[in-house]
Image (cartoon, rainbow, N blue to C red):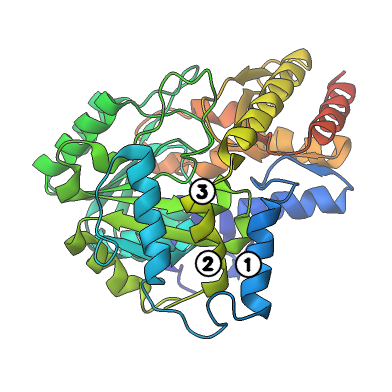
Amino acid sequence: MSTPPWARSAAGANTYDAVTGTVLPTIYERTTAAAAAHGGINLGQGFPDTEGPQWMRESAAEAITTAAGPTNQYSPGPGFGWFREAVVSHQQRHYGTDLDPETQVLHTTGATEAIAATILAFAAEGSEVVTFEPFYDSYGSMVALAGAQLRTIPLRAPDFRPDVDALEAAVTDRTSMVLVNTPHNPTGVVFSPAELERIVGIAARHGAVVMADEVYEHLIMDDAAYQHQTILTIPGAAQVAVAIGSAGKSFSLTGWKVGWVTGNPELVNRVRGVKQFTTFCTGGVFQYAVAQGLEDDRGFFAANQAELQTGRDLLMEGLAAAGLTPYRPDAGYFVLADVAGVTDKTAAEFAAELVAHAGVGAIPVSSLTLPSTQKDHDDELNSLLRFAFCKRHDVLETALNRLAAWIG
């Protein structure tokens, strides 16, 4: 049996058994299943264990059951006009961008579809795609499906700042795309305007498209080194970049799968050319509720950020007390922690024992990297685990008590 294209990527290496030809669940699904099997606490998969705003959920319910909003039939492929206008209003209010809702905004089924459609639109077969490592696992699979090759530059502890000099050395005329994720999953680093400006300039010189995955834009802590600024505000980005956003993370409604792509009309139209033959359209009633949230979050963004920051600090303190070395994120849902202080095992081996014996699920960062055989740099990320803090504080405390007891 021949190896499918996606299995030749980083994600494929973790989700495909070449001997049996069996497709395995993603690392997120496997961690969640392992936690459930052991009666454990899942700090692996990045979803909140509390619901998003009540008023948004009521709005979606009203749209489903009454004539208050859109019908339950097909919505326009690019998204309802009022949804795209709400995205434009949100971007203008927060970042000062000036977008045309008719030609510069595209609704997608979550950020994952936006990522897939964008990479398939611009990653030319036989080209190279460059990104920072670790990375969201769909990047690797979609690059492989496009017939391109992924190259990575590691983000290194303790601050995980992007090495833009290394990126510049990696980008060549063979490079079709540069994938940027800021705020970054899973390190929590927020790229600075100067770093983004250099990245845009590097891509422009080589004729590459920049995809900026910005789904954690509203999950930035008070003590962050930089605040988020969409890449579309960077000089020169209008010609070479598209930005991806999502309601799932911003409003703690990850199951709604409402995302969007913004950028200049030509680039967005090319993404639409792929997207219209995947889902075509989804979630009209969810677009209705999300549009209201984008127009006015009613204080949710600030309250959610404060709650997350408290959870982050609680998790970091407990991990350090247990003997791990946690690294403080500036944004997002996750703390990365080095396990080298408590074990000689890799983080992947340690994670398997942690969920089996302590009932705590975490994700090894190595599962979000290229296989070692495909890299030209060392594997210092192999000792890092990703723990999610987007959970109730009592849940975090219970998980930390289990972790400490097991290690002790």
Q: Quadrant of residue 370?
A: top left
Establish if 126 lies above or below 240.
below
Q: Amino acid at mark 1?
A: Ala
Query: Seen in the image, is 204 located left or right of residue 17?
Result: left
Q: Nearer the viewer, mark 3 or mark 2?
A: 3
For mark 2, what is the residue? 288
Q: Is residue 94 visible?
A: yes
Q: Which residue was labeled with disc 1? A: 60
Which circle's residue, 3 or 2, is located before the other in the chain?
2
Q: Residue 296 bears which disc, if any?
A: 3
**Closer to the camera in the image, 362 or 215:** 215
Secondary element at image label 3? loop
User: Disc 1 versus disc 3: distance between alpha carbons?
Assistant: 15 Å
Q: Which secondary structure, mark 2?
A: helix
- Residue at the image point whose x is 72% and y is 51% from the top: 51
Is residue 81 placed above or below 355 in the rendered structure?
Answer: below
Query: Is 61 drawn above or below residue 227 in the view shown?
Result: below
Q: Are marks 1 and 2 in contact (CB under 8 Å)?
A: yes
62 left or right of 219? right
- Mark closer to the chain start, 1 or 3: 1
